[in-house]
Structures are given as structure tokens and as C-alpha cells.
């Protein structure tokens, strides 16, 4: 069964109950959005999920939401940068505590977006590890479950507990020390664009 | 096909010996840590390898990636069997890498990072020795299809290879410190190298005499009257290098011990390859059987020809820049 979607394909932002019914019950979309993203043309043609039989389909819900979350975080970070630029031009950037608070709490968004992108890429290509050539189930090597559990536990302990703890310990130490005093800076901080004065050397000309 | 496969076997063999020598001495310096009590001496020891240790470990990545690309069958056969020791090595190297960075910043936790550095170096070496021992002993592939590795890497021979490698690396590290340091630190290293060379000799004799009895094929290769006159050159060379080492230590030469210990490693390594040839998975898969498709080998060979010269050059260049004695703590 091959089904080609032609013409206008809307980019769905939100919808429910995709996996069971294979259709979108409730959705919010951008007209032509998916056509534009995937094929870079207004009425681009996409090969739909229904063109492959269910055993060759990935688990759609994970991919669907991780991709959306990644994009939303991306726009949020971009928005923050725009707000920062606006504040800087208005010469309020270094006094806006509310903005610092937002920056502080959104600090992990880059990591989360990265993970989401990774999940989208890796789960989205299942069940293939090499597309149309090698299935993940056939690519698995003959390592015993016990060995996998040992190595997995070691990774979790080493990264999570030991390095995680010391990473945050040193991070905490650095934050407690705080940034350098503002008055030690050599240039006025509210000047949006500052260039170094040209260096003149004796003996030139 | 055969020439290409042989070329790739040669490139990988070269990458592995580069790794053994280069990372060998910095792992050895890590394992020397408990012999030196003062923090200042430890700082100096770290400073001698700080600019080069990560470059040394690129050869491991190079060897692993080349094996994966050129001999995928070897990679997929051996890695599941040696999964645990290789994993142990990676975790140990990881601890070591982090210890390098955090030790410089640490005040209260310095002891912890010193221990991490030592244990990382020790366990990485032990794991490498187990892998080496398993290779010499050969693999039993009949048991491995159901995903059980049977711990083929853990036996008396592999453990003695492991211990021998620990002593060998410490010897390399100690000889390296003789070149890089002055004063009391250097004097201590002379004393350590002096003792270790005898241990090295003992373990060389044990492993050399043991391995022919593991496998009749190895015995046949080394002791048949046709090969023996030629192959006897190798153990003889090994002894010559050990004598040079002994002479260098006795007369307080700075460069001779390091280079002659490298000579010992190289002759042992060549001996190891002669025992295994033409097998890449000993007694099961030859390098010709294991080779990837001709087009992949050729494609990668072009890449290797482009990448190897810069790799060799930056290795040479970084040693050239950082040559000379280390007398003050480095940091970044």
C-alpha cells in the first residue's frame, strides 16, 4: 500500500490520538507548513506514514511530541535572544532582574532540545538502523543481557552519581564565587556596540 | 584484495603499537602515582603528560575505527566476547580523563582525583592486558552465538599478561619521567626502572615460554627447524634491548632507557603478530577472510593516506614543542 500525499500539506502543531486510529482527531496546524519544511516548496509532496505497513512504522507519539518540543524550545530561545537585544538597545539589560530569572530557569532548554532532537532522529528511523537495508533487530550483537546490565549500571553510576555530583559541585563553586565586579570593566556596559579604539604604534608611517 | 587487506592489517598494527608506546608511558606515569608522596611531585608528573596524553589516546580511536571499517567481521566477532574488559577499559580511561581536568581545580577533593587517576590508569592497563592475553590464547567461537561470552578473557594466562603489561607500562612511564624531570624525582625513577627491568625480564620469559604451550600452532611456528634460525633474532633483539636498558640505567643515561624499553615493546609486539599471522581472530578468521569489500578498503585507504601524515606530524610536533625538562606545574 503506497499513499502519496500531494498538494497542500499542513504542519500539525498539536493533535491527539494519532497512533491508534492513524488519523488526526483534533489538530492545530499551519497551512502548507510541512510541505515547506520537508521539501522547501509550497506544494511539496511527502510520502506519508501510511505508505508503510504498521510493522515498519516507528512509535509515532514519541517522535511527534519530541519534535514539537524541540521546535518550541528553539523558538523560545530565539524569543529570549530577541528580548535580550531589545532590553540592551533600551539600556535596561543589566538591570532587569526578571529577565535574569527567566534566563536562569531556561538554562537547561538547550540540553532538552538536543535530547528531543536525538529522540526524534533515533526513534523516528525505527525499525531500521540503516534505512531499508538493516533492521535494528538484525543488527544487535550477541552480548548477553547480564553484560549489558553491568555496563549500563556502570554508566549510570559513573556519569549520574560521580561525575554528575562533581560537575554540579564545581559549577556551584564557580557560581558562588560570582562574576567579576562590574566597575573593573574598562568600557561602559550600557553602550550596545563597543569597538576597541584603533591601536597606534610609534614608528608607523 | 589481498594487498589491500594486508595494507589495512599493517595500518592497524601500526596504530596499535603507536597506542601501546604512547599511551603506555602516560598510563605508566598514572600507575606511578602512589610511589610519590608529595603533591608537588604529582603535579610535575601530571605536567609531563598534560600536553600529550589526549593525543596519545587518539591512536586507540584510530585503531578501533580502522578495525571497524576494514575488518568488520573481526570487530563483530571479538567485541561481544571481550565486551566486559573493553568496557572496563573505557570506564577507566573516562575516570582518568576527568581526573586530569578536575584535579587541577580541586582543593579538598584532590585525594579523590589522585586515586581516580591512579585507578583509571591501573584498570585500563589491566583490561588491555586481559584483551592481549585472550588474543594470544585464541577464541572459542562455538559458545558465543547465544550471547554468552563465557569469560574467555579471564584465565591464568590472560591475568599474567595483564600483570606483565602493568609492569611494562610502569617501566615506560618511569623511563619517560627520567627524560622529563630532574633531581630527586629523576633519581627515584632511576631506582624504580632499575628494579622493574628484572621483573620485566622475568615476565617476558614466563609469557614467551607459556604461549607456545597454549597452542600447538604457535609452537610449530616458532620451534620448527625451518623458521627457528630467523625467528630466534627476535628474542635475541629483545635481550639486546634489555641489556641496553640495564646499561643505560647503570650509567644514568637519560634517553637510552626510554628508547630501549620501546625496543623491547616493539620486538614483543612483532613476536605477537608472528604468532597470530595470518589470523585476526586467532585460529578462526584470517585477515583476508575478515576484510571488508574491496571498494570500502580502497576508499578508506585514500582517507588514511590523507589523514595519517598530519596525524604523525602533529604527534611529532607536539613532542617537539614540549620537549625538555618539566620543572614547574602546568595548568589551564
Image (cartoon, rainbow, N blue to C red):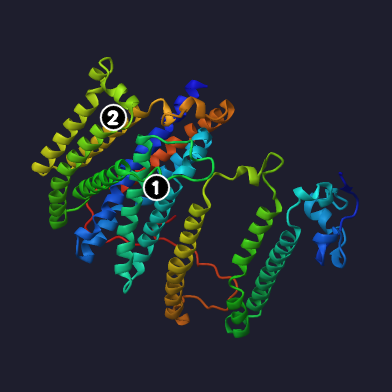
Is residue B215 or residue B162 the one in the foreground?
A: B215
Is B120 rendered above or below residue B281?
A: below
Element class at badge 1: helix
Residue located at (65% from left, 78% from top): A87
Is A146 rendered above or below residue B146?
A: below
Q: Judge whether residue A199 can be spotted in this image.
A: no
Spot the residue most to the top.
Answer: B226
Disc 2 versus disc 1: distance between alpha carbons? Answer: 31 Å
Give the mark nearest the N terminus, 2 or 1: 1
Read off the chain for label 1: B
Spot the residue most to the left.
Answer: B251
Q: How far from the left and from the top, in percent, is residue B283?
A: 42, 29
Q: Judge whether residue B317 can be spotted in this image.
A: yes
Q: How far from the left and from the top, in percent, is residue B186?
A: 16, 53
Residue located at (62% from left, 84% from top): A98
Residue B212 image label:
2
Q: Residues within 10 Å of mark 1 (few under 14, many from 20)?
A: some
Q: Which residue is mark 1?
A: B57
Is residue B118 or residue B147 the one in the foreground?
A: B147
- The quadrant of the rendering that contains the C terminus of chain B is bottom left
Read off the chain for label 2: B
In the image: residue A168, left or right of residue B228 = right
Is A100 rendered above or below residue B236?
A: below
Q: How far from the left and from the top, in percent, is residue B62?
A: 45, 41
Q: Are marks 2 and 1 on the same chain?
A: yes
Picture quarter containing residue B99?
bottom left
Q: How far from the left and from the top, in percent, is residue B8?
A: 46, 29
Is residue A150 or residue B276 the one in the foreground?
A: A150
In the image: residue B19, left or right of residue B228 = right
Picture quarter containing residue A36?
bottom right
In the image: residue A62, left or right of residue B89 = right
Amino acid at each position: 500500500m503506497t499513499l502519496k500525499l500531494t498538494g497542500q500539506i499542513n504542519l500539525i502543531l498539536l493533535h491527539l490520538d494519532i497512533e491508534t486510529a492513524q488519523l488526526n482527531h483534533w489538530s492545530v496546524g499551519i497551512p502548507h507548513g510541512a510541505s515547506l519544511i520537508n521539501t522547501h516548496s509550497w506544494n511539496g509532496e511527502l510520502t506519508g506514514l501510511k505508505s508503510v505497513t504498521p510493522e515498519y512504522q516507528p512509535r509515532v507519539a514519541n517522535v511527534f511530541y519530541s519534535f514539537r518540543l524541540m521546535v518550541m524550545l528553539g523558538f523560545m530561545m530565539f524569543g529570549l535572544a530577541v528580548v535580550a537585544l531589545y532590553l540592551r538597545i533600551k539600556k535596561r539589560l543589566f538591570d532587569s532582574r526578571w529577565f535574569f530569572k527567566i534566563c536562569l530557569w531556561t538554562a537547561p532548554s538547550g540540553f532538552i532540545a538536543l535530547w528531543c532532537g536525538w529522540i526524534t532522529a533515533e526513534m523516528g528511523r525505527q525499525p531500521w538502523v540503516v534505512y531499508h537495508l538493516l533492521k535494528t533487530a538484525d543488527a544487535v550483537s550477541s552480548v548477553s543481557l547480564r553484560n549489558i546490565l553491568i555496563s549500563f549500571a556502570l554508566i549510570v553510576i559513573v556519569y549520574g552519581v560521580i561525575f554528575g555530583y562533581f560537575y554540579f559541585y564545581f559549577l556551584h563553586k564557580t557560581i558562588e564565587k560570582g562574576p567579576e565586579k562590574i566597575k573593573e570593566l574598562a568600557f561602559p556596559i550600557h553602550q550596545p556596540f563597543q569597538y576597541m579604539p584603533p591601536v597606534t604604534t610609534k614608528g608607523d608611517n | 584484495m589481498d594487498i589491500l587487506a594486508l595494507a589495512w592489517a599493517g595500518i592497524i598494527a601500526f596504530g596499535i603499537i603507536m597506542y601501546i608506546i604512547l599511551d603506555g608511558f602516560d598510563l605508566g606515569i598514572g600507575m606511578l602515582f602512589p610511589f610519590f608522596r608529595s603533591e608537588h611531585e604529582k603535579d610535575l608528573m601530571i605536567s609531563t603528560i598534560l600536553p600529550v596524553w589526549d593525543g596519545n589516546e587518539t591512536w586507540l580511536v584510530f585503531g578501533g575505527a580502522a578495525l571497524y571499517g576494514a575488518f568488520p567481521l573481526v570487530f563483530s566477532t571479538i567485541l561481544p566476547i571481550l565486551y566486559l574488559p573493553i568496557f572496563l577499559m573505557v570506564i577507566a580511561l573516562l575516570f582518568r580523563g576527568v581526573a586530569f581536568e578536575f584535579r587541577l581545580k580541586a582543593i579538598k577533593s584532590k585525594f579523590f582525583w589522585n586515586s581516580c587517576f591512579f585507578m583509571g590508569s591501573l584498570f585500563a592497563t589491566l583490561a588491555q592486558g586481559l584483551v592481549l592475553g585472550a588474543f594470544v590464547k585464541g577464541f572459542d567461537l562455538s559458545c558465543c552465538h547465544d550471547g554468552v561470552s563465557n569469560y574467555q578473557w579471564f584465565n591464568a594466562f590472560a591475568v599474567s599478561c595483564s600483570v606483565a603489561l602493568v609492569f611494562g607500562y610502569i617501566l615506560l612511564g618511569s623511563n619517560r619521567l627520567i627524560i622529563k624531570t630532574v633531581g630527586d624525582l629523576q633519581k627515584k625513577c632511576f631506582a624504580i626502572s632499575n628494579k622493574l627491568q628484572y621483573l620485566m625480564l622475568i615476565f617476558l620469559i614466563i609469557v614467551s615460554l607459556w604461549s607456545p604451550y597454549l597452542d600447538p600452532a604457535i609452537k610449530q611456528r616458532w620451534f620448527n627447524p625451518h623458521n627457528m634460525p630467523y625467528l630466534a633474532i627476535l628474542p635475541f633483539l629483545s635481550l639486546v634491548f634489555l641489556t641496553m636498558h640495564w646499561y643505560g640505567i647503570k650509567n644514568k643515561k637519560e634517553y637510552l632507557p626510554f628508547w630501549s624499553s620501546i625496543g623491547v615493546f616493539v620486538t614483543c609486539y612483532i613476536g605477537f603478530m608472528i604468532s597470530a599471522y595470518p589470523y585476526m581472530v586467532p585460529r578462526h578468521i584470517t585477515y583476508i577472510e575478515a576484510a571488508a569489500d574491496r571498494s570500502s578498503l580502497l576508499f578508506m585507504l585514500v582517507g588514511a593516506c590523507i589523514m595519517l601524515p598530519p596525524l604523525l606530524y602533529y604527534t611529532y610536533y607536539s613532542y617537539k614543542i614540549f620537549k625538555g625538562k618539566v620543572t614547574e606545574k602546568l595548568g589551564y
